[in-house]
Amino acid sequence: MMESANIHVNRLPDWIQRAFKSRKAIRGAHSALVGRFQRFQEILSLNNQILQHIADANNKLSGDYVFDQRYVHTSSKNIIGLVEKLVYTLDALAPGKYRTLRTVFTRIQTEIEQELSGHQTKVSTTFVINYNKISHNSMDEVGAKSANLAKVHSDLGLKIPRGFALTASAYHAFMTVNSLEPMITGIYKDWKAEKISLNKASATIQSRIQSCSLPAKLEHELNSAVNSLIQGRRPLIALRSSAWHEDRQHSFAGQYKTVLNIPAAEVRDAYRKVLASLYSENAMVYRHEQGYREHEVAMPVACQEMIDASVSGVLYTRDPSMPERDTLIMNATWGLGLPLVSGEAGADRFTVSRGTSLKITSIHVARKKTALRLNMKGGTRIENIEPRMQSRACLSIKQVLEVAEAGVMIENAFRQPHDIEFAFDELGQLFILQARPLALRPSRVVKAKDLAEILSNRAILLKEQGEIAQRGIASGPVFVIESKEDLDSFPDGAVLVAKTASPVLAKVLSRAAALLTDVGMVTGHLATVAREFRVPSILNCGNVSTLLSSGQSVTVDAEDNIVYEGIVPELRDYALTEEPIEETYEYRLLRRVLKKIEPLRLVEPFGENFTPEDCHSLHDITRFVHEKAVEELIRGTLYRGRAAKRAPRLDWHIPLDLFLIDIGGGLQPGAGNRITPKEIISTPMKAILRGIAVPGAWDSKPMSVDFTSFMSSLTRTTTPELAKTGFSGQNLAVLSSRYVNLSLRLGYHFTMIDSYASERVDDNYIYFRFFGGVTDAKRRSRRAQFLADSLALNDFRVELQGDLVIGRLKGMEERILMNRLFLLGVMISFTRQLDLRMINDNDVSRFVEKFKTIVEESDGHKNQHFDLG
Amino acid sequence: MGTKTSILILDDEPIVIKRLKPSLEKKGYEVEAFTDSREALARVQEQAFDIVVTDLKMEGIDGMQFLEAVKETSPETEVIVITGFATMETARESFRKGVSDFLAKPFKLGEIVEAIAKAEAEQKKKRG
């Protein structure tokens, strides 16, 4: 797959060398340019290789691959190696100019290597994050418990207590300032070598942690966060552990400490207690058994106001002993929930079934003699319940259903059965205090071994017809999307079935049990969304949208690529207990390493943040080098001898802002500083320009008949957004009579074409690369899809990976090659407006169809005689 | 039960076992998995497996030695090699030693399932 990203641009082609040699007269003057161009080519080639390596690594996160640690190591090292070469090559092109880039690279490299070797890298200096500022991206900083709770509020609109998170960085700062890490490492070593007992190891570490002081900055931020939390409210606070991985699949439930009902003055002590609980005996053993490495340990802490509860309870969204039953179980009691959790108090028990609607199936009322209440001055008190209330159900029917409904929402949103703590305050408002995945006992569920037999008796609707975009198993009623309007009535938990893997579906995907489509690519946008929400997905199934009909129940096995008729409870329950691949060490490692490699933040070349110091990932560096390489070549020292310092520029009615560098017969001899199209000799360059100039493609000038209907949809209005999509950068073409290397930046689109066209069919090729970014993801993906489809229809070998589209064409007749270059020109021209125009997904196929027509028509008049003006 | 195809997996990276075992069991195979090549060796000397899936580079007895030993004790066993250090050389050597398939890591689950199905078919043909 990695087959040399582009054979043609990694060295200066022989024919260019030949061209130079044969033209003795200009050899001297051009030898410097040859060298520079060669480096430029190297940069382009490295750039391509890096982007492909990154996309490849990301693909491994789909869950469909088996990879080991070695893979994570080698692939990161490969990318590091390529980026290092890239940085060196830029230095060769512009010696000494971007020295800081080297430093930045080394820093990122060190961070990645630390990740790989298992040393925690410092994340940030943010120690406190308010609950309403927590986003999906804060998971590592705030821990799962806080992140999930924040999501319950922000995504589902349920009430949660006010509060804030003390971050992983706060934890690391605490550990570092107090030099605790070496001490812990030493004790761990002794414990594992059985030199000291578990009990001794745990006690030593815990007492050391509890005797340490908080870093000054942390103490200060904690104080002011607590002060603003208790302002004018009841001054009681709860601190809960929100350790890494604690609330994800490996449920560490109960391993770490929760401190309830404390006054503000005790928050610091409580914080230390919670941190220390990271090294409780149970927690140490548990992590050891689960294969967690010590450097994966961090303890963010959740800090919340206490809710003065009139009733508290715990909800299990499935019965742990019988997960196959669709039953929710709820326990509740008067007052605070602590006696309930610790099993001290009598509790009412409610069961609710969820068929088509929620129904209470049983109520068991216990005698509740006492309740734990908040003490206004701090702490708690035990209150006697008046006799007539003792045997009354503490939740009304309405409240039971309200809690159950919240539970179902949470289970759907997180795709897992959950264990939820809740409370009603004096005003009768429901608060979710905590929501964590419910560990189900696999012993009650069918083993993988016996599944095969059960499954062999089930009716199969679809087998191995599509491609798996996200692994997983799910069941539910089918809902076929016929039109965009159908999306509004998409029911929670249904199996989403559609003709295309359209990005429009992303809107409801998080609520879908599974996804099946007739066509679609596993590297496309929707697949990425499916992976984000872990929706089991099979794309490209061929005819699933006609095969299945709405309302019909199915079970989707996106592990073995099978769709079964009806609900297969054994398979569904098996899936509930399966350990997701996402929770394995290797997967976590890859995800962490990719965080330092993949995100592209450096997008605006003219922004003041386009500096080496602003590079935060290897992708950023790659982007930076590419941009600067183009700039360097344009600036070319070669032209210093002449009047102008810069390369000559194209003078044209289309504001391409294109610099031209001739490396041999690409321009008319004696051409000056401004080049008119007529002075261009390079045949491939001319073909591209003709395409760009096709009437109507670039702007809304009167257009030829063929194009009117098509283009009118593109040029109807001019919006401010559209105004930004002009060629906004330094665009460069390096030419010879038969060769062109074109780098264009257009708004946020980056296009590269490298092509050689001659009468020798074997030498001929086109390499096209398009990379987008920044704009709205749906449109971006439609655009990429459109490009990919159009290229494929025109004989290109196409790779589509997220925003990156690569097309290759080789060994074609010159005439055909010229036509394809012309097409690329048209494509470049109207892609700049495409994002704005591609309002819905039907547009993609419409544009592709229309494109086909253009090819056919332009094939007719061979030379595309459009006036270059 | 005896009709199930038996598979032994040997890989010193627990993740590989963790992924392969349940997936293959779900497909109806009888699977035993090892991260330690000595233990695996002891096991194959006890019982002949239909198919053996092994990594090449491991501590102690490495994959080449292991697969030689497997082929020696039970020539009928089909061996599939999975390795993170795939070179033409190791591939050639493996095939010379009678390996039926050679997969470079990382691979898709579907690929190993396919390789196993192929090996099964091959074996059936040989056994007649």
Image (tube, coloured by chain):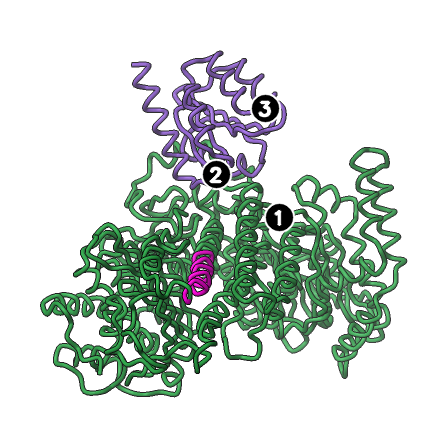
Q: Residues within 10 Å of mark 1 (few under 14, many from 20)?
A: some
Name the residue rendered at 75%, 44% in the picture.
A284
Task: Identify the magenta region.
Answer: A29-47
Give neighbour class at mark 3: few <14, some 14-19, many 20+ (Cα, 10 Å). Answer: many
Q: Which residue is mark 3?
A: B37
Q: Chain of mark 3?
A: B
- Return the mark for residue A250: 1
* Chain ID of residue with mark 2: B
- From the viewer's perspective, is residue A716 above or below residue A109? below
Label 2 and label 3: CA atoms lie apart by 19 Å
Tags 1 and 3 touching, CB below 8 Å: no
Residue at the spot of label 2: B105
- Quadrant assignment, res A421: bottom right
- The vertical placement of A517 against A620, above or below, is above
Q: Chain of mark 1?
A: A
Give SS at disc 2.
loop
What is the CA distance from the residue labelled 1 to the residue labelled 2? 27 Å
Tell if the residue under mark 1 belongs to the same chain as the one under mark 2: no
- On the question of residue A517 being in view, the answer is no
Do the residues at pointers 2 and 3 share their chain? yes
Give the residue at x 88% y 59%. A212
Which numbered dot is residue A542? none
Q: Nearer the viewer, residue A56 or A478?
A: A56
Q: Is residue B40 visible?
A: yes
The percent coordinates of residue B110 (x first, y second) are: 39, 39
Left/right of residue A829 with respect to residue A609 in the rendered view: left
Callout 1, which amino acid? His
Q: Position of residue B123 (x, y in %)?
A: 35, 19
